[in-house]
Image: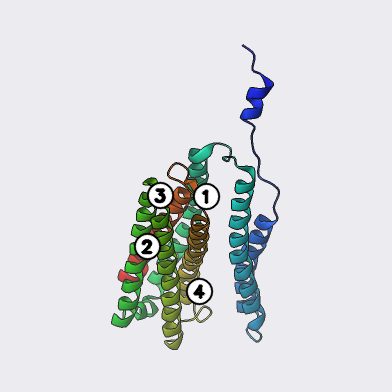
Amino acid sequence: MTTSVEEHGAHEIHLPQPTAWPLVLGVGFVLLPLGFIVWNALEATPIIGQIMMGVGLLLVVGAVFGWMISNIRERQKAHEEPLGGVEAAKLAMWAYLGSECLIFGGLIANMVYLWLRDHEVNEMLHHFESLIIVSVNTFILLASSLFVVLALSAIQKGNRQGLAMWLAFTALAGAAFVGIQGYEYSKLFEEGITLTASRFGSGFFLLTGFHGLHVLVGVLWAAVLAIHTLRGGFTQHEHMGVEVFGLYWHFVDVVWILIFTLVYLI
């Protein structure tokens, strides 16, 4: 049996256009740990390392935001579903989250080791005030997972306004989490627990800061999806972006539960 040219043309494979955003993202991720190393090595001029980490953070956030925007615009222009459809997109996200498990697993294992070595410093995280702050933050992040579930349920019923509303709530909850985490950091600095004061401090801020960076990326992602929804994006039958985002956000929440249990409760 032969297949006509027209049949091939109707199912033409659409490949994404070349973009520099992954390169920018990679540079940002390199600058973050490199800046931390320089910060520790140059004790007399730590500002150099701090600037490197700041630039790295800006590059990571900017690259994620720019990459998402360019991807949405390209799909709108092409009017085609990515190769493999929803299932391929989910598989790609699961593969990415699998690599994230390795990174977070190493950071958590390092934190447990440091906790065993420096138990006295760890006790500072178990103050009543500290536990209250982190418990409230944990509740906010868990509530945001519910918002994501409600957002997906809304678009599955064809309720685009509901999707935009719950995505906005998710972004606000994530932003609140990052803000409260910043307040917690300021209190820890007052107690003498800083990024360079001890190995325990380094491990703690690397682990929780890396997680906070993931939350920040999720906030930008949710905001972009909400804006895209208000501009007519997503339908009852085409909402792949929401499903993929949901996998990412639930993963971030599960990781925080592990961090909250191992670092703050035990």
Q: Residue at x 47, y 63 (%)?
A: 107
**Residue 42, percent from left and from top:** 65, 81
Local crowd size for mark 2, using a 10 Å CA cut-off: few (<14), some (14–19), many (≥20): many
Q: Residue at x 64, y 83 (%)?
A: 47
Q: Earlier in the sequence, mark 4 or mark 3?
A: 3
Closer to us: 6 or 176: 6
Q: Which residue is mark 4?
A: 202
Tell us which disc is closer to us: 2 or 1: 2
Residue 157 in sight: yes
Residue 266 in sight: no
**Residue 233, percent from left and from top:** 51, 51
Q: Secondary structure at mark 3?
A: helix
Residue 155 image label: 3
Measure how far apart labels 3 and 2 are at the Cα level.
17 Å
Residue 96 image label: 1
Q: Which amino acid, mark 3?
A: Ile
